[in-house]
Amino acid sequence: MTRMNELVMFNGKVVCPRCDGNGLLYKAKVTDLGNQMIYICDECEASWQDNIPIRRDTFEDLSTYLEKKGCNYRDAEIVNLGYDWYMNS
Ligand SMILES: [Zn+2]
């Protein structure tokens, strides 16, 4: 996948391009949104939908994203699918 070219790895995990090394991105699915796949930073909660290139200028706050979809951060069921997603993509 082309998106990998822009991402920095740390200990086999993908570094968040928004908070510059503080956070790592895990893949998650939002059960309430028909199992929509997203990537979330474990530090700053920047998020990227599955079909969006992961870059600093394309992130969306997780809460903003959920609200836009008619969900909210507190009630949304988000399943963490782990940090090794880049190996399978
Ligand atoms: Zn981050």
Image (spheres, helix red, strand yellow):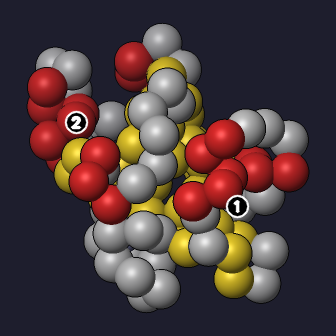
User: Which mark identifies residue 83?
Assistant: 1
Residue at the extreme top of the image, as rendered: 34
Judged left or right of residue 22, residue 85 is right
Judged left or right of residue 16, residue 9 is right
Residue occupying the point 70% across, 61% down: 83
Q: Please indicate, yes or no, whether residue 69 appears anywhere in the rendered image.
A: yes
Q: Regarding ligand 1, which quadrant of the image does it lie in?
A: bottom left
Judged left or right of residue 9, residue 78 is left
Residue occupying the point 49% across, 26% down: 51
- Say above or below: 18 vs 47: below
Looking at the image, is mark 2 or mark 1 earlier in the sequence?
Answer: 2
Residue at the extreme right of the image, as rendered: 87
- Identify which residue, 68 or 31, lies in the foreground: 68
- Say above or below: 1 vs 15: above
- Say above or below: 3 vs 5: above
Please state which amino acid type lies under the numbered disc 2. Tyr
Q: Quadrant of the N terminus?
A: top right
User: Which mark identifies residue 65?
Assistant: 2
Q: Please indicate, yes or no, whether residue 62 appears anywhere in the rendered image.
A: no
